[in-house]
Amino acid sequence: MFDPISDMLTRIRNAQKSGKKEVIFPFSKLKLFISQILEKEGFVELVRMEKDGNHENIHLSLKYKKISNTQKLPAITEMGRVSRIGQRIYVKKDEIKKVKNGYGILIISTSKGIMTGKEAKKIGLGGEIICQVW
């Protein structure tokens, strides 16, 4: 696995599209911070860590919007990696834009930690765009 963040985003995206209640992936601090932002912004219901022997995993309880008794829409319509291993994408505080006209979020790695694009713009920080979610 070359890019663990892309792997995490793909696992979440695939689990959401197939209607799973939960997705599990290996622990890292960066993945935990991204997961906590997704929980805080209302894209997932619950983030918890579990230790399985010598390995730690992150469990995400996925969130769905009920349309009818038989249909449900995933809270995450799409998510994608912006900055990749081969091409890092950095933005200044003035270059941070809204995602899907404010319906989505940017997750940015700044000098003050991992945060949403809205928070980074408010504080006046730029950084590396990790991913966008809507």
Image (spheres, rainbow, N blue to C red):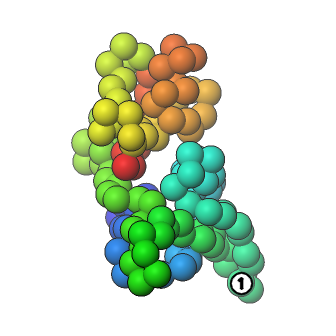
In this rendering, would 101 be left or right of 59? left
In this rendering, would 93 be left or right of 37? left
**Relative to residue 37, is residue 57 depicted above or below?**
below
Q: Position of residue 67 (x, y in %)?
A: 42, 69
From this viewpoint, which residue is outermost toward the front? 68
Q: Please state which of residues 116 and 4 is positioned toward the viewer in this rendering.
A: 116
The residue at the point 41 percent across, 59 percent down is: 76
In this rendering, would 110 be left or right of 83? right
Q: Please state which of residues 127 and 131 is positioned toward the viewer in this rendering.
A: 131
Q: Please state which of residues 116 and 28 is positioned toward the viewer in this rendering.
A: 116
Q: Position of residue 53 (x, y in %)?
A: 74, 86
Q: Is residue 15 visible?
A: no
* Amino acid type, residue under disc 1 in the picture: Asp
Q: Position of residue 42 (x, y in %)?
A: 56, 51
The residue at the point 56 percent across, 38 percent down is: 114
From this viewpoint, which residue is outermost toward the left? 87
Query: How many numbered tags mark residues here?
Result: 1
The residue that label 1 is drawn on is: 52
Q: Is residue 84 visible?
A: yes
The residue at the point 48 percent across, 20 percent down is: 121
Q: Please state which of residues 33 and 12 is positioned toward the viewer in this rendering.
A: 12
Check the picture and name the quadrant holding the N terminus. bottom left
The residue at the point 57 percent across, 17 percent down is: 123
Within-10-Å neighbours for mark 1: few <14, some 14–19, many 20+: few
In this rendering, would 31 be left or right of 5? right
**Relative to residue 70, is residue 91 depicted above or below?**
above
**Relative to residue 87, is residue 112 depicted above or below?**
above
The quadrant holding residue 5 is bottom left
Q: Element under label 1?
A: strand
